Amino acid sequence: MRVLYTWLCIVITVCAATTGDVLLALAMRRIGDLGELRRRRGFLPMLLRVLSSGVLFAGVFFMAIAFFSNLVGLSWADLSVMGPASAALTYITNALAAKFFLKEDVNRRRWLATMFVFCGVLILTHT
Amino acid sequence: MSVRKYLVILSMMLFGAGGDALLARGMKQAGAIDIHHILNIFVVLANPYILFGIVSLLIFMWSYMTALSFADLSYVMPATAASYVLMTLLSIFWLHEHVGVERWSGILFIVIGVGLVAGEPHRTGDTPEPEVGVEAAEDRR
């Protein structure tokens, strides 16, 4: 049962982290290049533009869910299971979500990069 | 990609790794927080390592958002993994931890992954900067 709860936490963490990242990316894409915005309109209007984005706060909300779900998972499972699983899997789900929800061109090279990073993070967080 | 954009991605890597390392060091000094004395969490905020760690992670978050404002998620995400490499280097030189062959191989994988994505175009997809685009048109008028 403990294993089931751990994997449930991993799934919730990965899904919430991916949703958070996609919403944040979507919000920032809609707002536009912050450097350009600051240059054209000034710092305060740029900050107000960022803070008035509901999608951005939805993203932060899902990131908070991922954070707390990770914490709950860590109280049940070993760091050597929870850490690598949630950190490394998020790279793959993010690449998938970027392709299907943000319509990014995730070509073979980006997939290869994602797989290398997945393996690297898996090794580093497991050891 | 301009120098400014590379600097944003570099700051994301540096402050992400730095924030994690500072928090780890601060929490080692502060010790475990008992669930029955959860308010002690505010006491550890007085620890300078934890305070600078939080500030560092806030700068990371701003850099991450700025990077996402001009680059794809599938471009920025692998770059965030470079902070694992920096964390390992920090743990060798600052925390004096031993790093074995396994961890070095993990670093190698990440470096190859980040290197592969670095040569890619940073923005693809179908929604190019709507707000700035409108403002640029207004400016031209």
Image (cartoon, coloured by chain):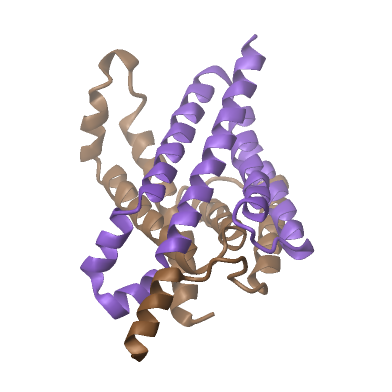
Outermost residue toward the bottom in this view: B141
Name which residue lies at 59% across and 66% down: B126
Residue in the image at 65% along x and 44% along y: A93
In the displayed structure, A40 sits above or below B13; it is below
The residue that appears at 40% across and 56% down in the rendered structure is B60
The picture quadrant where one finds residue A113 is bottom right
Q: Nearer the viewer, residue B61 or B18?
A: B61
Q: Residue at x 32, y 47 (%)?
A: B54
| Count of picture labels | 0
Tint of chain A: purple
In depth, the one of A111 and B102 nearer the eye is A111
As rendered, which of A8 and B125 lies closer to the eye? Answer: B125
Depicted A115 relative to depicted B134: above or below? above
Can you give x and y, in whole percent of width and height, for residue A4 in the image?
65, 15
Q: Position of residue A27 (x, y in %)?
A: 44, 56
Which lettered chain is shown in brown? B
Quadrant where the N terminus of chain A is found in the figure: top right
Of A31 and A65, the residue lying toward us:
A31
The C terminus of chain A: image quadrant: top right
Q: In this view, does B56 lie to the left or right of B13?
A: left
Q: Where is residue A45 in the image (x, y as percent from the top left)?
A: 24, 67
Q: Can residue B72 be seen in this view?
A: yes
Farthest-out residue, top: A1
